[in-house]
Image (cartoon, coloured by chain):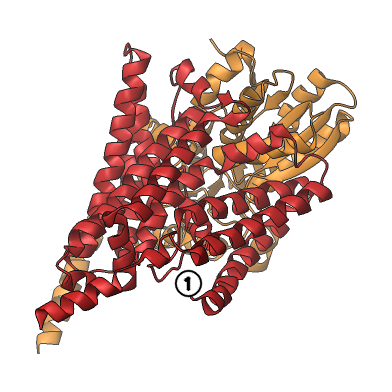
Chain colours: A orange, B red
Amino acid sequence: MKLSRFASIVALTVATALPTIAVAADKPVVGLVMKSLANDFFKNMLEGAEAHAKKRGDYELKAIGMQNETDFESQLNGVENFITQGVDAIVIAPADSRAMVAPLKKAMDAGIVVVNFDVSLDEQAKKDAGVDLAFVGPDNRGGAKLVGDALAKDLGNGGKVVILEGNPGADNAAQRKLGFEDAIAAGKLDLLDSRTAHWETEEANAVFSTMLTAHPDIQGVLAANDSMAIGVVKALDAAGRSDIKVVGFDNVPAVAPMLKDGKLLATVDQFGSEMAANAIDKALAVVAGGPKLEGWVKTDIKLVTKDDVK
Amino acid sequence: MQALEKTQASETIDTRRLTGWSPKVLLRDAGIGLALLLLIVFFSLGTEHFLTPNNISNILTQITINLILAVGMTFVILIGGIDLSVGSMLAFCAVVGGTVLTIPDLPVFQAVALATLAAVGTGVVCGFLNGWISAFWGLPSFIVTLGMLNIARGAALQVTDARTIYSFPPSFNAFGSQMIFGIPVVFLIALVLVAIAWFVLSKTVFGRLLYGIGNNEEAVRLAGHSLMFYKVAAFTIAGALVGIAAMVYMARLNIASPIIGIGFELNAIAAVIIGGTSLNGGRGTVIGTLLGACITGVLANGLILFGLSDFMRQMITGVVIILAVIIDKYRERLTGV
């Protein structure tokens, strides 16, 4: 008796809730799935998307983030919630390039437009699941090549360099390392050592100081993100070495003074704050009946040097 | 009856043999020192650059933050507790201190003094809460500090809106890499803290009661001492040291970010354990912790100079932690301390 009453209440609530969603959906709803919001880069990206939603005004934005970089369970739950809510499009920066394929397939099967940005889903995993999904995002390898070339140009042939890598196993870390290696090969640089500092300032500071002890003849440093580049610059300050050139990646605000006084030679801006907004535009175009996205839609990257800092 | 209990209790908490007074304890620290010495000899012979003045000062700089955190952790582990929140607290203390440090138009000296006060104050409050909550409700500090790990990290993100604070006063920044006779000033600060901790733990009644709590909490209570006070004090000291470590972090790296310090608690615990302090409490010295921090620092540095891959390095660090605990087990059997 009690149970059936409970069931009828649930049924009633669901029945009244469903039409509300449907009525409110005259504006398309975009579900934005972000990575860790405890990170300047994604924080800026989210703010960019929110500003974009306000400016366009013709869609409703629902955003979710994660606790930290590896917490893909909350992404998974987020995608499932968006499917249940029946959003029109899901725009996602996947936390794991394999784990997110299955839930996204479920979303596509439910007729939701899915756009993948920031980090590309794994090709093989996509093939295995029978998913055909375009990627909107920057070329991390190309960006790393760009900034690596700037260093190679400054050092000339035979310049001795070391690499500080991001997290082992992370796709963007691997891509950036490949890009650095491309630049090293093209510029005929001499790679002395390559180690991870897990994207971290303090660890980069310690690891690089030790690398410098082992190879006092280092002339250039390629850091896979600016946080690590900051640690390297501080280590050079402490060691009193102003002859070593450093390049980074991301163009975070904290490096502006370092670019200005020449402690950082260059970094790469991949316009993180516009990246989510860009992907949303692409998704809305498809929702409005535009052609399906295909392959890799590359977004802008730009080399940032002293000249770009006012 | 009560008088009898009291005598028994004071016997149990006569912990002189545990606190650096007896030859046996000195022998134990000497054993860890010997392990450190062997490592140094090994790396000196095996690599070209290990035993150079520059590299030594690098190692000292690199272990400073971990050493300060580990000194605080020693207090907590000695009473049989654990503090999992120090990494998050480091970030929280740093962003609070960093916010004060970047107040515009404040004279450098005042800014640094106020920032230190703010950072240490933040650590003290968090540490006090850790101790008080676990003592008042009789909860395992493992769980309470796991809660604080999340609270402090969330607070750090909330305060900064997840943004990095940078551009500290140049003279403060320069202080972070200052040397005296090739020894980093920040390391000397850590050494002073070690000396103070050593004095407090081995020469004061307060310190001996901390050992007593780790050995036999009930006995200390029956002897008429407030467990609450000593537990809260141990965690509060750990918190204050986190605040100091946060200032050192900012002086060294010139940034304060809410995502720094992830996993630092584990490095601090490793240094304490390698230094021969028992996770069960009541046994260990802060000199051991100093040696433990040196061992982890020398390993991290030496293995890079050796050209070992990052992954091998991580594995070896793990092996050393386990070895240290196994050796400790035998040492306990052989020497009785």
Left or right, B38 with respect to A249, comes to: right
Q: Quadrant of the N terminus of chain A?
A: bottom left
Q: Residue at x 83, y 41 (%)?
A: B48
Q: Chain of mark 1?
A: B
Nearer to us in this view, A54 or B232: B232
Which secondary structure, mark 1?
loop
Is there any visible trace of residue A33 in the rendered image? Answer: no
Q: Residue at x 75, y 40 (%)?
A: B51
Neighbour class for label 1 at 10 Å: few (<14), some, many (≥20)?
A: some
Left or right, A298 with respect to A18, comes to: right
Q: Position of residue A136 (x, y in %)?
A: 59, 42
Q: Note whether A122 is above or below A174 in the view shown.
A: below
Q: Residue furthest bottom?
A: A1
Q: Position of residue B308 (x, y in %)?
A: 77, 53
Residue at which label 1 appears: B337
Q: Note whether A153 is above or below A100 in the view shown.
A: above
**The quarter of the displayed image where residue B162 is located:** top left
Q: Note whether B68 is above or below B74 in the view shown.
A: above
Q: Note whether B55 is above or below B213 in the view shown.
A: above
Nearer to us in this view, A52 or B202: B202
Q: Check disc 1 and give the amino acid type.
A: Val
Q: Residue at x 56, y 53 (%)?
A: B291
Q: Position of residue A76 (x, y in %)?
A: 45, 62
Nearer to us in this view, A226 or B29: B29
Q: Position of residue B79 (x, y in %)?
A: 33, 64
Q: Residue at x 39, y 36 (%)?
A: B94
